[in-house]
Image (cartoon, rainbow, N blue to C red):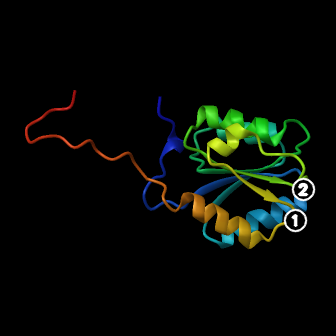
Amino acid sequence: MQNSSDHQTPGQPTTILIVEDEVIVRMVTVETLQDAGFKVLDAGDGNEALQHLHGDTQIDVLCSDVNLPDINGYALAAEAMKRHPALKVVVMTGYSTTPTPEYLKTAGARTLYKPFDLDELVHTVRDMTAHQTPHPPEPVRAKGETPA
């Protein structure tokens, strides 16, 4: 089953979900990403983030703090990627000794260590979505061939 977040619609800005329990950090991060041209949704905890992820809004990138009050950011990312396999993930942590799980590394997730420059987050998201294919390419068929 294909989910709406698997492919970005042409002409629409990339939609980012920011999950951060520190209100001021979340507000500044949202504002910075909006100023950079992204559509931004935000959540203060994992449960609120899951509501966004289970909704109808197309989300292209999940940026989540690791230490949330109700769910670990790594677990949130894993749950989100089950529902939206093409979802890009950025995990943000202040604990450089906690390694990013292999399943997230394998999926192409990026880790930013706090404190980081917000321009670094903007650059990371742009880099992750630069080669995003809006729709799967149409299969090449011989003239007169009909789809199976």
Looking at the image, is mark 2 or mark 1 earlier in the sequence? Answer: 2
Q: Residue at x 62, y 43 (%)?
A: 107
Residue pointed to by mark 2: 94
Regarding residue 51, the answer to whether it shows in the image is no
- Find out whether the residues at labels 2 and 1 contact each other: C-beta distance under 8 Å: yes
Q: With respect to residue 89, does 119 lie above or below?
A: below
Where disc 2 sits, the SS reads loop
Where disc 1 sits, the SS reads loop
The amino acid type of the residue labelled 1 equals: Pro
The quadrant in which the C terminus is found is: top left
Residue pointed to by mark 1: 115
Regarding residue 34, the answer to whether it shows in the image is yes
The amino acid type of the residue labelled 2 equals: Gly
Left or right of residue 64: residue 67: right
Residue 65 lies, in percent from the top left, at 82, 50
The crowd level at tag 2 (other Cα within 10 Å; few <14, some 14-19, many 20+) is some
Q: Residue at x 70, y 33 (%)?
A: 79
Left or right of residue 22: residue 19: left
Please state which of residues 57 and 98 is positioned toward the viewer in this rendering. Answer: 98
